[in-house]
Amino acid sequence: MKNKLIIATALLLVLSTLGFAGCRSDTSESSQRQIATVERGDLTVTVPADGNLDMPRQVSLKFGTPGTVKEIFVVEGQKVREGTLLAKLDDTTQKLAVSSAQYNVELAMNELVEKINPALMGYPEMYPDTSTVLRVEQAQDEMVQAQKFLEQGEYQEAAAELRLAENDLDASYKMLNIPEIVMALQEQNEISYIVVDKYPNMASISRAIKLIEEDLTRLAEIQTLIEQGSYDDAMAKLDTEQIKVSETHGLIESLSGRVRISQRIGACCQELATQGSQEPATGLIPIPYPDTSTSLAWLKQVEENLQKIQACEDTDSCDALELSTLLRMAQHDIEMSRTILEDNELIFRGGVSLKALRTYNLNVQLAEDSLKNAKQGLMNTEILAPFDGTVVDIGVKENDQLSAFDYSSKTAVHLVDTNTVEMDGVVDEVDIYKVQVGQETTITVDALPNAELRGKVTFISPFGTQTAGVVEFPVKISLESSEVELKGGLTATADIIVEKHENVLLVPNRSVKGSPGNYYVEVVIDEEKVTTEKRPVALGAQNEQFSEVISGLSEGEKIIVEATRGRLPTSL
């Protein structure tokens, strides 16, 4: 076992060679004896541990689903930051599954509406699918979650949430930017009870499309910042993006959840519009999803009352009192309808029992769970870096087919954190009780003899192993960060510092003679004649080279040092 001596800020003892007068003409004895001066210094006692360097933070990353490898974004030896996209499967099937799950959520939400009032099912006018709003809302939730992960330093999870948000916004974009809606914007609506003008929201939908495009661009920039390790910049940009997405959501919600009141009510109804919930500037009334048919029902009833007002106005017999009464009745209907919607009473008045309502809620919940599973399936097609590290191996290539039998066992990317280094070593059973967790160590590597590394003991095994008749105990030492580029597996030796003694009298072990309890040194009385006397000493701490003198010697005294002996005659 390789033993090293550490003297932290130790004052070196002055050694000088001197021949002895009156000795034999044979000078071999005098050549083996030296004179040293007793001085003060710091004594460090260490316990050796031999072993190898290890990089424990490593992971063999695998895809979470079968499929075809679409793209590998890294190469061997490349350093990446946490959250970086490393590899990707063809995700066509998974994206279809997400769309299908989203559709099932829509069906579950519409089911109750159909049961309540199937006669009024229909659409007032072509407007964006309500799913566009839901997808934007989901993106908002995912961005909030990503922000929390960034604040907690969980960058891989943050990157995953942002990719989900990106997928939801992209889906919303595709729902808006399709030929059917573009054509509908330019066609006349033929539904009898609403306006037949050309669709008035073309400019707003075009603006919504542009806003989503800008949101997608900013999300991509945030992803890039995470991959570069600029986490503070990513958090700041994400704060801004959440505000921007809120603006996008507000616009799309206004387009997806409103219907237009028929212009046939005539000019006299503007008074009601200014008193009720209608917006005079647009003629639109907010209707919360999914009660579209419910909203249409009360809207149609109010419209019928307003038509009576119009008819009354067109006759000569309609006086001001009658017109005022009809207006009050119509306004009363609007207020009652709003109350019904807010209290959800219409659900039960429409013939749906509490059991049916609960079933409806469960169906919605199941559909939403299926949507979450579909999104997880989509994320399984991507591999993100779980921590900062170096790509040491790539086990797949583009167009490789991963079957249901081997996708979970085939490593796609092997990632290692080269900045987290440990030493796995062993300590002799004689010294194991001197070692404690938290003790500082100095580590040397055989391949780098001039590099001195530092670390701390992090683990001591309670169970020893016997090798060639010697019992040794495994220990782990965590190395501090260093500019030296280390490699896993290198042979290393650690000196574990178990004691430190400052400003004590020190003598070389080679100067001490005798046995425990009866130690002595030869003190030089006359340096010219080399006259000596035996002086009993009490010793304290000892390392491989020096011993602490508790009593018997004074600083500055000269002592004889044997040139050939290392440790004390009998170990302390």
Image (cartoon, grey):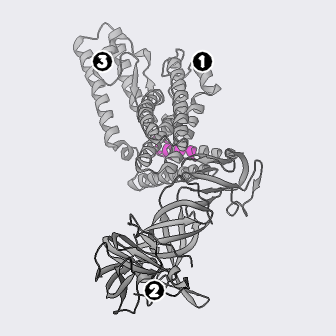
Instruction: Indicate left or right for 569 with 172 as reference.
Output: left
Q: Disc 3 and disc 2: Cα gap in Å? A: 128 Å
The x and y percentages for residue 478 are 48, 65
**For the residue marked with disc 3, what is the amino acid?**
Thr
Quarter of the view holding residue 184: top right
- For residue 35, side relative to residue 320 (left or right): right
Identified at 63% across, 44% down, the residue is: 95
Q: Which residues are magenta?
A: 101-117
Q: Choose the circle earlier in sequence order: 1 or 3.
A: 1
Q: Which residue is mark 1?
A: 187
Position of residue 562 measured from the top left corner of the image (x, y, whole percent): 47, 82
For residue 179, what is the image quadrant? top right
Question: What residue is disc 2 on?
Answer: 22
Q: Earlier in the sequence, mark 3 or mark 2?
A: 2
* Rendered view: 112 above or below 11: above
User: In the rendered view, would you say 45 is above or below 178?
Assistant: below
User: Does dot 2 land on a helix, a strand or a loop?
Assistant: loop
